Image: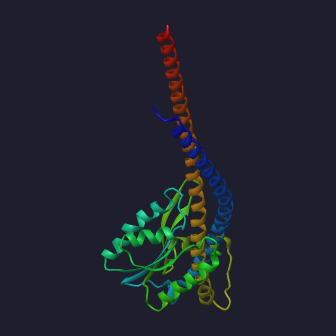
């Protein structure tokens, strides 16, 4: 027969856990609203900046010698920035990303590409180190740091390393925020910056239809040179914002599921407690009746 005291103690423990998960869900929900607003407001800016970049690049044509646009024929070393979280309790947010990152990195190493990893977040650092990857740079407990204070040194490292030939490509790996239930692991090459030719054709077509003539000061090459670093910082910034929104969404969902499971477990334990207590009462009554019969 189950011990009534043990069941009661377990019910009390699960109730306390439920209070914690419920509170964490509310906190994550409040943070999610703010993080979602920042991520969503950054998307139109990135899209508009991309359109401007496409239009300027189309005006310059293939004659540009801008080094940030030049692809290397032989890729021998790449820099990969991996964005994860420092804290857990957010479901499969980190594990889904890292499970896809692991074979992605190994494929490049198998192709004799030297991979330098810069990881953000304790979860990513611990995972990659445990899998034998050499983490050259790690940034921990960055959640409260202003995003631009993270973006500026990272993009400066990317640009400097690409221009001096240290890296042939630069990638950023993160979870793209789709909705509160879905965060999509994303692998984006940020250097060399790719100009979508089809988008350029569309931009040129729209420009011709509108019969708009753009003049660039001092010239299109100068504008393009100024736009490229800004576009790179925007790509990296939106990656951090998407990661932040996805983390809070995943944590809110995980804590909601944990709270529901705790409620179900409490109901199950309460039913078990009532059955055990009923069985104990029945046993006591049977013993009393048996004792009374024996005294006759």
Above or below, 32 relative to 141: above
Identify the residue at horizontal 51%, vertical 21% (top origin): 282
Counting the numbered discs, the total is: 0
Q: Whole-percent x and y of residue 288?
A: 52, 17
Q: Is residue 59 something one can see in this rendering?
A: no
The colour style of the image is rainbow
Give above or below for 260 relative to 42: above
Q: Who is closer to the viewer here, 179 or 131?
A: 131
The residue depicted at 41 percent of the width and 85 percent of the height is: 72
Residue 278 rendering spot, x and y as whole percentages? 54, 25
Q: Quadrant of the N terminus?
A: top left
Q: Residue furthest front?
A: 295
Relative to 112, say whether 36 is above or below. Answer: above
Q: Where, by quadrant of the figure, is residue 154 drawn?
A: bottom right
Which residue: 52% across, 86% down? 157
Residue 232 shown left or right of residue 170 in the figure = right
Q: Percent from the top left, x then y, of residue 45?
A: 66, 71
Residue placed most toward the observer, 254 or 67: 254
User: Could you tell me which residue is drawn at 48 percent across and 57 percent down?
Assistant: 92
Q: Residue furthest top?
A: 296
Task: Out of 141 and 71, give the one closest to the viewer.
Answer: 141
Q: Is residue 5 visible?
A: yes
Please state the horizontal and vertical placement of residue 106, each as a whole percent of the image: 34, 71
Q: Tell which of 69 and 95 is nearer to you.
A: 95
């Amino acid at each position: 027969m189950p011990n009534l005291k043990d069941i009661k103690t377990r019910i009390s423990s699960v109730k306390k856990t439920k209070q914690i998960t419920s509170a964490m869900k509310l906190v994550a929900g409040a943070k999610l609203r703010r993080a979602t607003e920042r991520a969503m407001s950054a998307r139109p800016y990135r899209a508009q900046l991309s359109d401007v970049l496409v239009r300027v690049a189309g005006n310059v044509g293939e004659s540009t010698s801008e080094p940030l646009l030049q692809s290397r024929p032989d890729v021998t070393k790449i820099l990969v920035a991996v964005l994860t979280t420092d804290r857990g309790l957010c479901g499969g947010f980190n594990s889904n990303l890292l499970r896809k990152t692991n074979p992605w990195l190994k494929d490049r190493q198998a192709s004799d590409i030297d991979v330098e990893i810069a990881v953000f977040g304790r979860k990513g650092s611990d995972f990659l180190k445990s899998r034998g990857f050499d983490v050259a740079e790690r940034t921990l407990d960055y959640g409260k740091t202003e995003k631009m204070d993270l973006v500026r040194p990272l993009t400066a490292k990317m640009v400097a390393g690409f221009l001096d030939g240290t890296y042939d490509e630069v990638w950023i790996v993160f979870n793209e925020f789709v909705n509160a239930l879905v965060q999509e692991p994303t692998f984006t090459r940020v250097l060399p910056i790719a100009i979508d030719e089809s988008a350029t054709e569309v931009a040129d077509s729209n420009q011709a239809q509108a019969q708009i003539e753009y003049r660039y000061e001092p010239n299109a090459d100068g504008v393009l040179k100024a736009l490229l670093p800004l576009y790179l910082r925007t790509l990296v910034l939106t990656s951090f914002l998407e990661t932040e929104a996805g983390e809070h969404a995943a944590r809110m969902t995980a804590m909601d599921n944990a709270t529901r499971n705790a409620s179900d477990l409490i109901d199950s334990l309460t039913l078990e407690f009532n059955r055990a207590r009923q069985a104990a009462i029945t046993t006591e009554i049977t013993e009393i009746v048996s004792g009374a019969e024996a005294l006759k």
